[in-house]
């Protein structure tokens, strides 16, 4: 099942990348990042079945970082929404110069 | 799991949950409404939790349901509700034939790259430190023991730094989302 898991992980990661590149709603872009993290977690778990349980420790770390990232990222989105009244990434061009 | 007892049952359900995860992920990226997208992402996470359990990672499967589907996605839905983003009409994603074509080609190229990497035999040349195999581990220590042992020995520093990271995230979230009173 290792090959199937890694293929599924690659497919999910690719779907996440395509979502990040094509969507313009900041919240959906964030959810696509979460999907990419999940894909990486799947390959960690699949490889831990072969190489030992250390991979699952890294999954725990990735989950923690994902939680922290979601909290800070959503706070940034709320803060941007307060300024711009929008979460459309096309409208966020403060640093465009 | 019961791989050696019921191989056909195991394989069928593995492919079933893989298919559910894949289809739900595709539906998730194509939804316009953020609420619908979030709920489809929850379906992906449940399917992945089932796959984790089938891959001998029961604890990670439980954490997937509790932390990801239970906590992180609720925060996402909460922010969607808070910002009142339920109207997908004003959102304009990258559309048009050329945008879709470019996105599709990019995705296919990335999949091809990942598949070529896995064909290259790189994945089988890892030199990882010797750790007990997951099958061996479902012994007296249960399924959490084998994860806890390296977490609190080799990765103790990283574990402690994680607590600092979470503290920073909490303070950062509060400071960023707080309304300026002055």
Image (cartoon, helix red, strand yellow):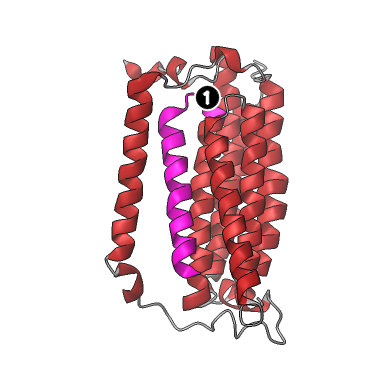
Q: Is residue B42 visible?
A: yes
Quadrant occupied by the C terminus of chain B: top right
Residue farthest along the front direction in this orientation: B8
Residue at the image position 63 percent from the left and 68 percent from the top: B54
Which is nearer the eye, A67 or B115? B115
Which is nearer the eye, A88 or B151? A88
Q: Dividing the picture into quarters, in which one does residue B9 lie? A: bottom right
Residue at the image position 58 percent from the left and 68 percent from the top: B11
Q: Report the magenta residues as a range.
A: A1-27
Q: Which chain letter goes with mark 1?
A: A
Question: Does B40 appear above or below A58?
Answer: above
Q: Is residue B168 visible?
A: no
Q: Is residue A3 magenta?
A: yes
Q: Secondary structure beneath disc 1?
A: loop
Q: Position of residue B55 (x, y in %)?
A: 59, 69
Q: Position of residue B178 (x, y in %)?
A: 66, 26
Residue at the image position 47 percent from the left and 27 percent from the top: A23
Q: Which residue is mark 1?
A: A25
Tell me which secondary structure the magenta stretch mostly adopts: helix
Which is nearer the eye, A88 or A97? A88
Quadrant occupied by the N terminus of chain B: bottom right
Q: Dividing the picture into quarters, in which one does residue B148 lie? A: bottom right
Judge left or right: residue B23 versus residue B123: right
């Amino acid at each position: 099942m290792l090959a199937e898991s890694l293929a599924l992980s690659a497919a999910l990661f690719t779907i996440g990348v395509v979502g990040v590149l094509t969507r313009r709603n900041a919240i959906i872009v964030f959810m696509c990042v979460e999907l990419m993290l999940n894909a990486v977690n799947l390959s960690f778990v699949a490889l831990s079945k072969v190489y030992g349980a250390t991979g699952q420790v890294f999954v725990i770390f990735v989950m923690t970082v994902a939680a922290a990232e979601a909290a800070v990222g959503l706070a940034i989105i709320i803060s941007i929404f307060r300024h711009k009244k929008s979460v459309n990434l096309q409208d966020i061009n403060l640093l465009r110069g | 799991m019961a791989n050696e007892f019921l191989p056909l049952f195991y394989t069928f359900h593995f492919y079933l949950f893989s298919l559910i995860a894949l289809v739900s992920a595709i539906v998730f990226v194509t939804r316009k409404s953020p609420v619908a997208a979030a709920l489809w992402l929850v379906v992906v996470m449940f399917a992945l939790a089932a796959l984790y359990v089938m891959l001998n990672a029961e604890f990670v499967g439980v954490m997937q349901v509790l932390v990801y589907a239970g906590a992180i996605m609720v925060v996402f839905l909460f922010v969607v509700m808070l910002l009142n983003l339920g109207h997908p009409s004003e959102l304009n994603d990258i559309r048009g034939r050329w945008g879709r074509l470019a996105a599709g080609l990019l995705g296919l190229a990335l999949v091809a790259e990942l598949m070529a990497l896995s064909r290259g035999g790189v994945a089988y040349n890892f030199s990882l430190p010797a750790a007990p195999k997951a099958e061996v581990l479902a012994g007296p220590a249960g399924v959490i023991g084998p994860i806890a042992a390296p977490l609190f020995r080799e990765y103790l520093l990283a574990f402690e730094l994680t607590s600092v990271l979470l503290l920073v995230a909490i303070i950062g979230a509060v400071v960023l989302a707080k309304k300026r009173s002055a």
